[in-house]
Image (cartoon, helix red, strand yellow):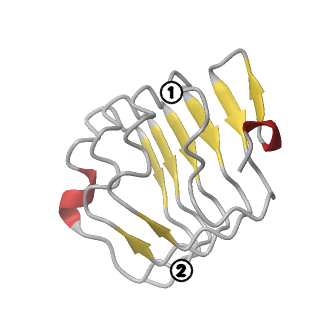
Amino acid sequence: MPEASCSCSSSTSCRCDELGLTSIPQNLQPTITSLYLLRNEITSLSQSDFSRYRNLQTLDLDTNHISTIDHQAFYYLTSLTLLDLRSNQLASLRADMFVKLENLQKLHLLNNEY
């Protein structure tokens, strides 16, 4: 996916909403602090998906089709304060998948299948 598909401002925030994405884009600036991926076609999150975006503070994955999240998918996101997983297809979550999110203040999980 070309970076031009996402709307990025000043290398800190990228909006990749409603682009039909099936995976996390890997060609955005690694310094971004906010990543919005609303209303795409993402079905799973792997351990490496966010490893290059270690400065993320906001990650919004609202309204995708996520049913599987690797227990280390958020491992490198130690600065994350907001994680939005609303309106996905999550049936269960492992307790240890959030262990590295020491700064997390808001976790949105409404409208899932659990």
Residue at screen point 75% across, 28% down? 8
Amino acid bearing label 2: Gln
Q: Position of residue 91 (x, y in %)?
A: 41, 83
Can you tell which mark lies on residue 89?
A: 2
User: Quick check: 83 left or right of 18?
Assistant: left
- What is the tally of numbered marks visible in this picture? 2
Quadrant housing residue 21: bottom right
Residue at screen point 81% across, 58% down? 18
In the depicted structure, whether residue 108 falls above or below residue 15: below
User: Quick check: 92 left or right of 44?
Assistant: left
Quadrant housing residue 53: top left
Disc 2: CA contacts within 10 A as few (<14), some (14-19) or many (>=20)? some
Q: Secondary structure at mark 2?
A: loop
Amino acid bearing label 1: Pro
Q: Secondary structure at mark 1?
A: loop
Q: Which residue is mark 1?
A: 30
Disc 1: CA contacts within 10 A as few (<14), some (14-19) or many (>=20)? some
